[in-house]
Amino acid sequence: MSFYFVQFVTGLSSACSLFLVASGLSIIFGVTRVVNFAHGAFYMLGAYIGYTLTDRLSGVVGFWGAIALGALAVAAIGTLIEMLLLRRIYDAPELFQLLATFGVTLVVEDLVLLIWGPSELLGPRAPGFTGAIDLFGQPFPTYDLLLIALAPLVLAFLWLLFRRTTWGVLVRAATQDREMVAALGVNQKWLFTSVFALGVFLAGLGGALELPREAANHTMDLQVITEALVVVVIGGLGSVPGTFLAAIIVSELNAFGILVFPKISIVLVFLVMAIVLIVRPWGLLGRAEAAARAASGMVLSRWRPLRAEGRLFAVLALAVAALLPLVAGSYLVGVATEVLIFMLYAASLHFLLAGGGLASFGHAAYFGLGSYGAAIALKACGLGMETAIVAGTVLGLVGALVFGWFCVRLSGVYFAMLTLAFAQIAWSIAYQWTDVTGGDNGIIGVWPSAWAASPARFYWLTLALSAGGIALLRAITFSPFGYALRALRDSTLRAETIGIERRRVQWMGFVIAGAFAALAGALYAFLKGSVFPDNISISLSIDGLVMVLLGGVGTVSGGIVGAAIYRSLSIWVISHTDYSKLVLGALIVLLVVLFPKGLVGAFEAWRSVRTLAGLHRQNP
Amino acid sequence: MSVSKLSVAQLDAAYGQAQVLFDVSLEIGAGEAVALLGRNGAGKSTTFRAILGLIARPTGRIVFDGEDISKCPPHEIVRRGLGYVPEDRRIFSDLTVEENLLVGRQPPRPNAPTWTPERLFAIFPNLRELRGRAGARMSGGEQQMLTIARTLMGNPSLLLLDEPSEGLAPRIVEQMIEAIREMKREGLSLLLSEQNLPFARLVAERVYVIEKGAIRFVGTVAEFDAQPDVRHAYLAF
Amino acid sequence: MSILVVEELGKSYSGFQAVRDVSFVLEAGEMLALIGPNGAGKSTCFNMIDGQLAPTTGRMAIFGKSTAGMTPGDIWRLGVGRTFQVAATFASMTVAENVQMALLSHHPRRWPALRWAARYHVAEAERLLALVGMTDQAQRSCGELAYGDLKRLELAIALANDPKLLLMDEPAAGMATRERHALMGLTGRIARERTIGVLFTEHDMDVVFGHADRVLVLNRGTLIAEGAPAAVRANAEVQAVYLGAGSLYGARS
């Protein structure tokens, strides 16, 4: 009994940092409508900067002074990023803001590596809180008790800040109606900046306060951002008390999950989130959004199938691609195969995101299910490559069928978060179900059948399946079904009024996208000869979004162009520098700022301006 | 007309690609109350939103108190003393009455009446009892009073009032008329948009008629009443 | 038989009674206007009739069938067309494709097909667009249409399921005077030819009194008058709450 109690109290102490990070995320979202993916990175910076400052300045300002200074330093960095980057993209679709903050995360990850090196850094103990007390016969760190006391204090502080200060009233007003606040003479720019600074300060503080409990390390950013997103979604976006409650729930689930279901402890949290979202789609203490944003700010331009010149171009491109192995070496052919696989993966996400307006943040789930399905079919069931690829695709399809049924019940940011949650469930299963998936060691020896074993042959097989898949996705896009999916994107109201069943159509769209992603995943397993939990990772899901947005979400097929460019670029960068994340992250940030319509979108806009100019010249 | 308070010249405005205002020009003198009449969708709200910079206004010159504000963002315009009351009220429903007023607060201004919550409760007595109540739990008439009071907290010298009588019970409309007259006595200049002709007659000295985004008539209330054809052509009744 | 029967319809939102005890019927081929000041509950009534909102109290029947629990799609399949106050169309499609989309949904196919959707129901779409006078704009992108044309397109979409009941929420809003009368004249003609009952809300009294066979007046969620346009126009209560004939303030000024 006492053991469970101690476990419970440990859970409470973990809730503190999680609450700090998640409340910052929630406050920032409430006012600026930005899902700040970089929040995890700020948390990590808080830990590392806190480490350095406690190391160097403890003598001058004391341990607590150093911790506070560290959080302030992180807040200053966040403020700078808000002013230089986010201010330029507040009016962009919300996906772009997510992408930009993901870019920032990548940059921060490599900067941390550059500055502090690869090893874990264990911080000093907090003076006065180094020991442990006896709790029902079990030793319990006094520092953890301090954290348990701190969380409600922070909650009270935030409550007073929002209720009792003019600034807080302005923030609450802006959370509800930004434009009206401006129309009453409030300078939104500085309000946003100050809110962002506060949010980042909380993240930095959360990171610094973890120092005495666990070592600063390089994976803490993605780990905490995932948990913080879950907390915010369970609690209700924009609700600080909801965040507090959810932080406790999630921390306790983590603490007890490991005891009760050691195999699926991570799954438990996401399962609870999925249930909460379905029962209360706006979180425990959140409220329904007054008005959902129109089709995430997409520019709706007319879509039409390829005309003669476009088809000719596609055939030529295919012919050139088919000739590649005759002139290129096996390394280049391998790279090209990988690019093709990712073109199919991106096309499947593009189908869902651009064609259906459904922003999935967890598309890697289906890619990964395809990989694992194929690998397990080959290794455990002893099937051939051909059947294994089919088996992988079917597994992805079934996964999309199950997860999609839940996801299409939600929309907007909540849809995105639920897809992310399901992807994390799939990831944790792959990570923890060692008997079947090999866990962290993955499944190796996944090689193609003899007839497709050479790089050139496997390339041709991939080319055929990818090109076929992309063509099929395009055909579906322009079929009556694709039109129905797009009709729901353009105007859900009108579409439902003419008898299009939203859930059914979007569910089917989800399944189609998932199946093609799984096909890509199955091919990827055979290309690499192995499968790891990385095939389902968040970063792979985000990569998909980067590729689609890079290509242009308002275009019919921008995703494949984005995939070709981004994947080639990232393979090249990875092979040429140890700091590939730094380069790619900076590149993503730049592209978001320079080409908010995506590359293909920018090209189309440029072409239509030229066409118009041409018309003007002809008929002055 | 006395000294110019607000002068709008050749203002165009667009929602995306659709142009909604065409060459709109308006003059409001200091201390004057002017009504902008027009049917639903004629362009009244759009004119107000364009003056305030809430929608794109690619062309046109807007001069307020002798200074060009046509490139200013909304909050700067408001800080110069131009208050705006939106048609749909847009009360912060999570905030109490007092907090709503706090959002509108700006420093006092030499050329404009200075308002405090106490003074506002004197002309909108209903609000006094509701001061701690959340905006969501108020009737339409109470919300309309609050939205005007909130804007007055900015101590404006000119008030843009978008359809203040819309959807209100006659009793509340009468209170609204009293409140507007009180503001005029305080020396506030007013531009109000209306569909309700009797209401406009009671508070305004001059009239602009807008239809399909363009000004169709300018004149005093008496001149307007002398031309029933204008009324029939542009204002459904 | 009345094609639409509304009985004691009511809707309240967290204590606020938006619509109270509204009852009326609509006959085939009739143009029935629902008017009232902003916030009177017109849109709420409309959204209950077309299935977007569930009423708190009361019953509705369309073509003799109770619509309790039906979605907008179900009601559309009964043979009801709907246009919106703010035109709702598919911006990434052409004008013709918008209509074809409605036709595709009206004539479901047993098997999914991969043929380009714009190749289905071409003649039928042309016919509907001709009916509303938009033949020459059929291949234009819907995103670049003038507002008046969008409203006409909406009418064509609403007619795609060969409806016997049309629900039009402020069909003439945002249009020029001449266009308004043209659109309502067209609607009236189609309604008579096909014996479609039309229920519409409108702010433009010229449109209401020029085109409606019968008028319902809603104020604060309650019906306060019903009858022929001339009678409603002469009704003192209606004048006071809605038309603003001046009697209310005239005495004081």
Image (cartoon, coloured by chain):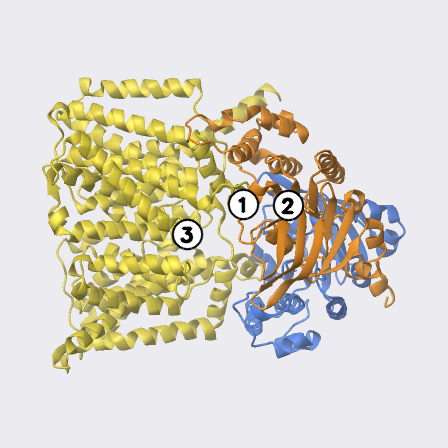
The secondary element bearing badge 1 is classed as helix
The secondary element bearing badge 3 is classed as loop
Residue B84 pos. (x, y %): 64, 60
In the depicted structure, whether residue B47 falls above or below residue A195: above
Q: Colour of chain A?
A: yellow
The disc numbered 2 marks a residue on which chain?
C
Residue A265 appears in which quarter of the rendering? bottom left
Left-right relation of A190 to C89: left
Residue at which label 3 appears: A410
Residue that appears at 66% across and 68% down: B145
- Distance of label 3 from label 1 (alpha carbons): 21 Å
Provide the letter of the chain coloured orange: C
Residue A462 pos. (x, y %): 23, 27
The disc numbered 3 marks a residue on which chain?
A
The front one of A599 and C142 is C142
Q: Residues within 10 Å of mark 2 (few under 14, many from 20)?
A: some
Circles 1 and 2 on the same subunit: yes
Q: Looking at numbered disc 3 in the image, what kind of residue is underneath it?
A: Leu
Task: Single out the mark in the foreground, 2 or 3.
Answer: 2
- Distance of label 1 from label 2 (alpha carbons): 13 Å
- Can you say which quadrant of the picture contains the C terminus of chain A? top right
Res. C63 mark: 2
Res. C74 mark: 1
In the depicted structure, whether residue C143 falls above or below residue A407: above
Q: Colour of chain B?
A: blue
The secondary element bearing badge 2 is classed as loop
In the depicted structure, whether residue A50 falls above or below residue A340: below
Left-right relation of A290 to C37: left
Q: Residues within 10 Å of mark 3 (few under 14, many from 20)?
A: some
Residue B180 pos. (x, y %): 74, 67
Task: Single out the mark in the foreground, 3 or 1.
Answer: 1
Residue A53 appears in which quarter of the rendering? bottom left
